[in-house]
């Protein structure tokens, strides 16, 4: 059975059936986490239904356009090049740590 993107599925005497094609807020909320799963070391290839869902979501014009806001979403490309991934991770850590330092200074009145 192939339903796209996320669907209401019901059990029938012949098995499962797609009832309605819906994209819900939960799809949008989870998409970013699933699309970036490789960053956390999770290979969604191990989860065929999840991978198919992610591919269907990415194929939607609105999702494709929105995932590049405010910056291009390049995680899949980064994961293909370990050196670039490490460089990006280092920059990301520095950015987060700088923000944490600023927050700490604001809290302490410095």
Image: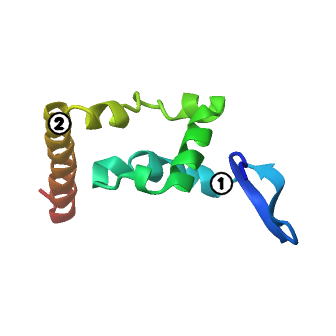
Q: Position of residue 40 (x, y in %)?
A: 29, 54
Determine crowd level at label 1: few under 14, some 14-19, many 20+ residues with C-alpha closer than 10 A.
Answer: few
Query: Compared to 79, does 7 lie above or below?
Result: below
Mark 2 residue element: helix
Q: Which residue is drawn at the image coordinates 68% and 46% (left, top)?
A: 5
- Quadrant position of the C terminus in the picture: bottom left
Question: Which label's residue is closer to the chain start, 2 or 1?
Answer: 1
- Residue 83 is tagged as none
Q: Which residue is drawn at the image coordinates 40% and 29% (left, top)?
A: 71
| Horizontal side, residue 57 vs residue 101: left or right | right
The front one of 83 and 50 is 50
Query: Compared to 37, does 66 lie above or below?
Result: above
Q: Position of residue 72 (x, y in %)?
A: 40, 27
| Horizontal side, residue 59 vs residue 88: left or right | right
Residue positioned most to the right: 13
Determine crowd level at label 2: few under 14, some 14-19, many 20+ residues with C-alpha closer than 10 A.
Answer: few
| Horizontal side, residue 102 vs residue 58: left or right | left
Q: Position of residue 106 (x, y in %)?
A: 21, 57
Q: Position of residue 21 (x, y in %)?
A: 79, 49
- Residue 25 is tagged as 1
| Horizontal side, residue 41 vs residue 52: left or right | left
Query: Compared to 98, does 15 lie above or below?
Result: below
Q: How many marks?
A: 2
- Residue 82 is tagged as 2
């Amino acid at each position: 059975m192939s339903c796209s993107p996320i669907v209401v599925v019901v059990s029938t005497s012949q098995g499962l059936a797609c009832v309605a094609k819906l994209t819900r807020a939960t799809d949008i909320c989870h998409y970013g986490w699933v699309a970036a799963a490789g960053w956390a070391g999770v290979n969604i290839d191990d989860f065929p239904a999840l991978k198919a869902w992610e591919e269907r979501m990415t194929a939607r014009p609105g999702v494709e356009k929105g995932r590049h806001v405010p910056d291009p979403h390049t995680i899949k490309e980064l994961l293909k090049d370990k050196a670039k991934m490490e460089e990006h991770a280092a920059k990301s850590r520095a950015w987060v740590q700088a923000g944490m330092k600023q927050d700490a200074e604001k809290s302490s009145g410095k």
